[in-house]
Amino acid sequence: MQKTLFSIMMLFLGFSAISATANLTEALQTAFAMKVTTIADMYQQDVNNQGQDYPVVLQQYGNQELQAAMRLEQDYFAREQTSCHIGYDVLWSSQDPDYGQEKKFSVTTQGLVQVSLAQGNDVYYELSCDDSTCQVADVILDEDGSSLREHLQSACR
């Protein structure tokens, strides 16, 4: 009897663990889908307006910290009449974006959204999400992990 009871309990625990794993996987898939949708929407808006949104589309999709860093850049330009930004459109990794180029969206093992552009460049986005929305927290500029937000915070003071 004890062996049977023990076996039933172990079976129940096994099913509970499988269910918990399935729920976790489903939650991760939902979070990844929200992140990709946010970035895809941001790119579509930029394509629709040919990069002419003000403030720039990245700032519109950014969280408070990224927006603050981008305001530092705007304030710096107003004060110094010179730029402290990266020198190219970070969404497209180009000074003269081809808004019609193909793009592929995916999520890296680190949870970043990767945008693979037809020109051969990849752009990586860190997002912060709650239950219903995601916002861009940062853009990773290169393979070394350089941060757009950190660049603006240090170069635009």
Image (spheres, rainbow, N blue to C red):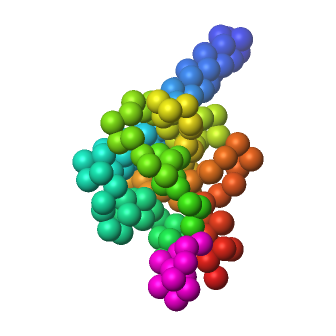
Name the main secondary structure of what is drawn in magenta: helix
User: Horizontal and vertical percent for residue 129?
Assistant: 47, 54
Q: Which residues are magenta?
A: 73-84
Asked if residue 44 can be seen in this view, the reply is: yes
User: Horizontal and vertical percent for residue 48?
Assistant: 25, 48
Q: Residue pushed farthest bottom?
A: 79
When the figure is inspected, residue 63 is found, relative to residue 104, above or below; the finding is below
Residue plotted at (61% across, 77% down): 156
- Please identify the quadrant where the C terminus is shown: bottom right
155 relative position to 57: left or right = right
Q: 127 and 31: which one is in front? A: 127
Q: Report if residue 87 lies within the magenta region.
A: no
Asked if residue 41 can be seen in this view, the reply is: no
Residue plotted at (51% across, 26% down): 22
User: Horizontal and vertical percent for residue 15?
Assistant: 55, 21
- Please identify the quadrant where the N terminus is shown: top right
When the figure is inspected, residue 82 is found, relative to residue 107, above or below; the finding is below
Residue plotted at (57% across, 44% down): 124
User: Horizontal and vertical percent for residue 7?
Assistant: 66, 13
Residue 100: quadrant of the picture: top left
When the figure is inspected, residue 113 is found, relative to residue 133, above or below; the finding is above
Q: 39 and 76: which one is in front? A: 76
Residue 80: quadrant of the picture: bottom right
Residue 53: quadrant of the picture: bottom left
4 relative position to 137: left or right = right
When the figure is inspected, residue 16 is found, relative to residue 40, above or below; the finding is above
Q: 154 and 127: which one is in front? A: 154
What number of labels is visible? 0
Q: Residue pushed farthest left?
A: 48
